[in-house]
Image (spheres, rainbow, N blue to C red):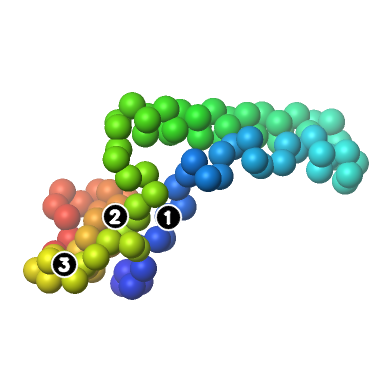
Amino acid sequence: MPSASCASREWPTRSNPASSRPRPITQAQADHWAPLDLVAALVQDELQRRQDRLLQRRMKLAGFRDLGKTLDTFDFDFNRKLDRRLVCDLAAGHFVDKQEAEAPR
């Protein structure tokens, strides 16, 4: 059952770029990590940063007008025929995970 909020998934935003996250090396120095653990964390961090940059480039190329808008701020009262629950279900993408051919009704 979907919640009343459509914010079930966190998306990278311009307000939280990858560069604002602390690098693993700082934590490794403080916690005295083993070298292999540090390398694994650095690789994972680099992969995450690359994924974030790729998403930012794709969003920029797509030319979305209002990047800050979400379904939580959408005015569903403007068009009362629009089914809020259906829109939130589609946004969550559960039908993709279940490999359903049709969207839920």
Q: CA distance from mark 1 to mark 2?
A: 9 Å
Residue holding disc 3: 78
Q: Count the marks.
A: 3
- The quarter of the picture where residue 25 lies is top right
Q: Quadrant of the C terminus?
A: bottom left
Label 2 Cα neighbours within 10 Å, binned few <14 / some 14-19 / many ≥20: some
Q: Which mark is residue 28?
A: none
Q: Amino acid at mark 1?
A: Arg
Q: Amino acid at mark 3?
A: Phe
Give coordinates of residue 84: x percent, y percent: 22, 67
Give coordinates of residue 100: x percent, y percent: 20, 51
Q: Are marks 1 and 2 in contact (CB under 8 Å)?
A: yes
10 or 103: nearer the viewer: 10
The tag earlier along the polypeptide, 1 or 2, is: 1
- Which residue shows up at 29% across the image and 55% down it? 91
Q: Is residue 27 left or right of residue 9?
A: right
Q: CA distance from mark 3 to mark 2?
A: 19 Å
